[in-house]
Amino acid sequence: MISDLKDAAEAARLRAYAPYSHFLVGAALRSKSGLVFSGCNVENVSLGLTICAERVCAVKAIEQGEMTFEAIAIIADTEVPIVPCGACRQVLAEFSPHLVITSWTLSGKSQQFSLADLLPLPGQGILVPRGT
């Protein structure tokens, strides 16, 4: 079942816009209803405005009314499988704090992570206290 996500992530990676870093990343996210949303990184000359592949997937899913996610696949040309950046972790945790993340390299190495392990206590200290 994860192989369909890997295939979608691989295809999305080839559409990445990364003229500055040349670091192409693809991702594919499966919603609770079984729909798959793919995404690629989109860079900007002002690097802080770059959006990661994982957030592209999440935004596409949310726009379609899907707000609970089961799994995400990520692929990049690295020696070891990558993990989502902190911003992506926080965005994904907003909707599915126990998301399963599987990451691949182009050479076929893979590693699976739990979002809860990568981002423990995603809302602690951020949410408004009770009674305010």
Image (cartoon, rainbow, N blue to C red):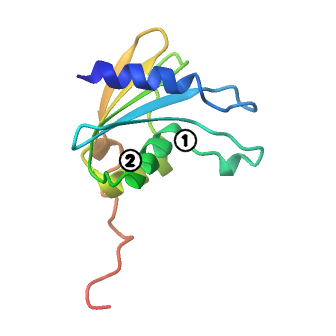
Q: Is residue 5 left or right of residue 25?
A: left
Label placed on residue 61: 2
Quadrant containing the N terminus in the rendered view: top left
Give how far across and how far down residue 57 sits, in percent: 44, 42
Give how far across and how far down residue 114 sits, in percent: 28, 38
Q: Residue at x 50, y 44 (%)?
A: 56
Give how far across and how far down residue 84 sits, in percent: 45, 39
Q: Nearer the viewer, residue 118 or 12?
A: 12
Q: Which residue is mark 1?
A: 52
Mark closest to the chain's N terminus, 1 or 2: 1
Q: Residue at x 40, y 13 (%)?
A: 109
Check the image and name the residue furthest to the bottom. 132
Q: Nearer the viewer, residue 47 or 61?
A: 61
Give the Cα separation between the discs numbered 1 and 2: 15 Å
Label placed on residue 101: none
Find numbered disc 2 in the image and state the secondary structure of the residue it sits on.
Answer: helix
Disc nearest the viewer among 1 and 2: 2
Quadrant containing the C terminus in the rendered view: bottom left
Mark 1 closeness class: few <14, some 14–19, many ≥20 residues within 10 Å: many
Q: Nearer the viewer, residue 69 or 122?
A: 69
Callout 1 amino acid: Cys
Q: Residue at x 32, y 21 (%)?
A: 4
Q: Nearer the viewer, residue 42 or 103?
A: 42
Check the image and name the residue furthest to the top. 107
Instruction: Look at the numbered discs 1 and 2 and tell me whether their residues touch, using CB distance below 8 Å.
Output: no
Q: Residue at x 39, y 53 (%)?
A: 62
